[in-house]
Amino acid sequence: MRIIGGELSGLRFNPPAKNWPTRPTTDISKEGLYNILANKIDFSEVKFLDLFGGTGNHCYEVISRGCMDATYVDKFPGAIKFVKEMAVKFRIEDRMTIIRMDVFKFVKSDKNQYDYIFAGPPYGLKTIKDIPDIILGEGLLRSGGTLVLEHNPNVKLDNHPKLTMQRNYGQTIFSFFNIS
C-alpha cells in the first residue's frame, strides 16, 4: 500500500494482514477518490474524521495533502498499534489523534464537527446503509462538508436524500453525502 499524493507521496506501508478484520481501500480506488476530492476540498483547511480507520490509509493521505487535524477511530487493537507506529515513522503524530473505540459509540459521544468524514466499514456489517443517517443525525458533518461512505454493490443508497454522487471501482463504491 502507498500514499498517493502530497508531501508523503510514494511512501509505502505494509500492515500485517494475518488475522486482521480490515479491508484496506485499494490504491486504484483510493487514487480515483482523491482525484475527485482534490477538486472539492482544500485539505490544508480540513478537520478530518476517519471512521473504521483500519490501516490508517485515509489519514496518511489527507495529512500528506496538508491536513493538520485528522482523527482516526477503530476498535481493533492491532490496527491501533500499527497506526501509532506508522504515525511515528511518517512523523505525523502531531497531526493525528488516534482513538480506540467502537465507531458507533464514538459517533454518539463526539461533539466535534468535521469538514470531511470517511467511513470504510467492513462490507459484512449489516447496518452500512444506516451509517450516513447516523453520522448526519449526530451533527458530526459541518455545513458544506463531505461524507464519503465506502461500500460494495450490495448496499443500495441511490435514493438517499443527501446523496450527491457515487463512484464505482469494481467491488468498491464511494457514496458522497453533503449537507448545506
Image (cartoon, grey):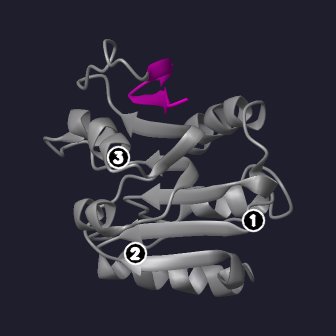
Q: Quadrant of the C terminus?
A: top right
Query: Residue drawn 41% across and 38% down?
Result: 150
Q: Earlier in the sequence, mark 1 or mark 3?
A: 1
Callout in the foreground (1, 2): 2
Identify the element where label 3 is drawn.
helix
**Residue occupied by mark 3:** 135
Q: CA distance from mark 1 to mark 2?
A: 18 Å
Residue 1 visible to an observer of this rendering = no
User: Where residue 44 sits in the image (x, y, percent)?
Assistant: 80, 56
Q: Mark 3, residues whose alpha carbon is within 10 Å: few (<14), some, or many (≥20)?
A: some
Residue range highlighted in magenta: 163-180
In the rendered image, the residue lying farthest to the right is 7
Q: Residues within 10 Å of mark 2 (few under 14, many from 20)?
A: many
**Which quadrant does the N terminus fall into?**
bottom right
The residue under label 1 is 11
* Disc 1 to disc 3: CB gap under 8 Å: no
